[in-house]
Image (cartoon, helix red, strand yellow):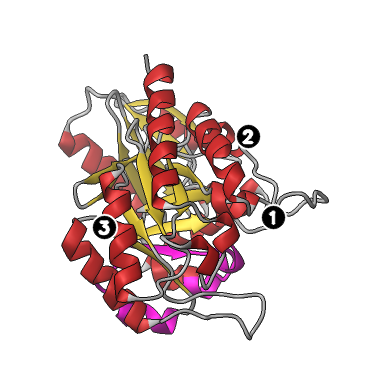
């Protein structure tokens, strides 16, 4: 259930209403908008008299919410959420370019990639320290050492860092990480999501390779139910019967998610296609359909990359993609 409170309501009146609702054993999620305040009532609202609340002078309207994703739904929070990561903003018209290698491999590699993508307009540095691999014999990442190398690259470039977590037990290693990525394989690792909900970290939540948008939003709801609303959603392609690409990039997810949720949405064309030659057209398309950012894998030597070299761009190629993406954004924003 949500109650829309008029702008004319005083702070004292709002606090009195919120106190009364909480007294009924109901949690209240408060969203302050430009034109009104939305109170999201969470819990067993069957005991709440809708007509009584609607009759209050300060209340504009009351209605029940059918969607199970309450806190991340746009009905609870009509205005776009803007995530601030250092001096970087994403959402609400702010666009982020996240770039870096699939795996952090060495000191020289990550510094070379970081400085090059920063020069081309990247705003956040991505790099895998813990790598979930289909084969147990593939490179699994440098783990804690990889995070240290990312932090060193951050000192050099000033870019906030994004890296993936595999296990809640690793959280102490992520204390200085700016954005914790939850990969597609862990999108429904609910125990991990609960732990991330207790942190104040920004979470980049990737859609599972065979999950619906509703399931993605319910996973975001797990994090928000723990008290953490700093979430970025990521469409990275889903598994279909198509075999020419690694996955099938669902660009329709962008406008649909923007309709359903206030959270920012980014596109990962690298994992979606699995082919470097397809990254540019899909990145441009992502910008055209209204994505709040893109995440692209960049490697200084893709042919010898320890992970996903086939879908990685060179720094020069990323620079060209970044230039075209910004042109598209200028065009659609007038």
The image shows residue 228 at horizontal and vertical percentages of 35, 59
The image shows residue 170 at horizontal and vertical percentages of 39, 82
Which contiguous range is marked in magenta?
Answer: 168-192
The image shows residue 73 at horizontal and vertical percentages of 49, 42
Q: Residue 161 or 173: which is nearer the viewer?
A: 161
| Magenta stretch: includes residue 187 | yes
| Magenta stretch: includes residue 285 | no
For label 3, the crowd category at 10 Å Cα-Cα, with few meaning under 14, some 14 to 19 and many 20 or more, is many
Residue 277 higher or lower than 92, as above or below: below
Mark 2 vs 1, N-terminal side = 1
Task: Measure how far apart labels 3 and 1 are at the Cα level.
Answer: 28 Å
Task: Say if residue 178 shows up in the picture.
Answer: no
Residue on which disc 1 sits: 246
Contact between marks 3 and 2 (CB within 8 A): the answer is no
Where residue 160 is drawn, which disc sits there?
Answer: 3
Residue on which disc 2 sits: 252
For label 2, the crowd category at 10 Å Cα-Cα, with few meaning under 14, some 14 to 19 and many 20 or more, is few
Q: Is residue 208 left or right of residue 102?
A: right
Q: Is residue 293 left or right of residue 94?
A: right
Task: Measure how far apart labels 2 and 1 are at the Cα level.
Answer: 18 Å
Q: Residue at x 52, y 69 (%)?
A: 304
Give the quadrant of residue 294.
top left
Task: Measure how far apart labels 3 and 2 are at the Cα level.
Answer: 29 Å
Residue 268 higher or lower than 6, as above or below: below
> Helix or strand or loop: what does disc 2 sit on?
loop
Q: Residue at x 61, y 41 (%)?
A: 66
Mark 3 vs 2, N-terminal side = 3
Q: Residue 275 or 231: which is nearer the viewer?
A: 275
Q: Residue at x 48, y 35 (%)?
A: 50
Residue 174 higher or lower than 333, as above or below: below
> Helix or strand or loop: what does disc 3 sit on?
loop
């Amino acid at each position: 259930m949500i109650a829309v409170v008029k702008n004319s309501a005083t702070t004292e009146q709002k606090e009195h209403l919120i106190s009364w609702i909480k007294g009924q054993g109901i949690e209240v999620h408060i969203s302050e908008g430009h034109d009104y305040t939305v109170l999201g009532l969470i819990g067993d609202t069957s005991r709440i008299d809708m007509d009584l609340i609607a009759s209050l002078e300060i209340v504009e309207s009351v209605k029940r919410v059918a969607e199970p994703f309450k806190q991340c739904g746009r009905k609870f929070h009509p205005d776009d959420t803007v995530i601030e990561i250092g001096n970087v903003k994403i959402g609400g018209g702010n666009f982020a370019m996240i770039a870096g290698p699939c795996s952090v491999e060495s000191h020289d590699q990550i510094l070379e990639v970081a400085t090059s993508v920063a020069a081309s307009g990247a705003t956040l540095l991505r790099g895998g320290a813990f790598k979930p691999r289909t084969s147990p014999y593939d490179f699994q990442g440098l783990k804690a050492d990889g995070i240290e190398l990312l932090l060193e690259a951050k000192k050099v470039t000033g870019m906030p860092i994004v890296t993936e977590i595999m296990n809640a037990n690793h959280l102490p290693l992520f204390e200085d990480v700016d954005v914790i990525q939850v990969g597609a394989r862990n999108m429904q690792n609910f125990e991990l999501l609960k732990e991330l909900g207790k942190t104040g970290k920004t979470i980049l939540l990737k859609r599972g390779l065979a999950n619906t948008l509703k399931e993605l939003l319910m996973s975001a709801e797990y994090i928000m139910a723990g008290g953490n609303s700093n979430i970025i959603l990521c469409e990275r392609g889903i598994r279909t019967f198509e075999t020419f690409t690694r996955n099938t990039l669902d660009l329709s997810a962008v406008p649909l998610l923007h309709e359903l949720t206030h959270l920012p949405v980014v596109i990962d064309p690298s994992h979606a296609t699995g082919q470097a030659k397809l990254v540019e057209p899909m990145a441009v398309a992502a910008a055209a359909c209204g994505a709040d950012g893109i995440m692209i894998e960049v490697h200084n030597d893709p042919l010898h990359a320890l992970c996903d070299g086939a879908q990685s761009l060179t720094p020069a190629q990323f620079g060209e993609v970044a230039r075209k993406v910004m042109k598209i954004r200028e065009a659609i924003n007038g």
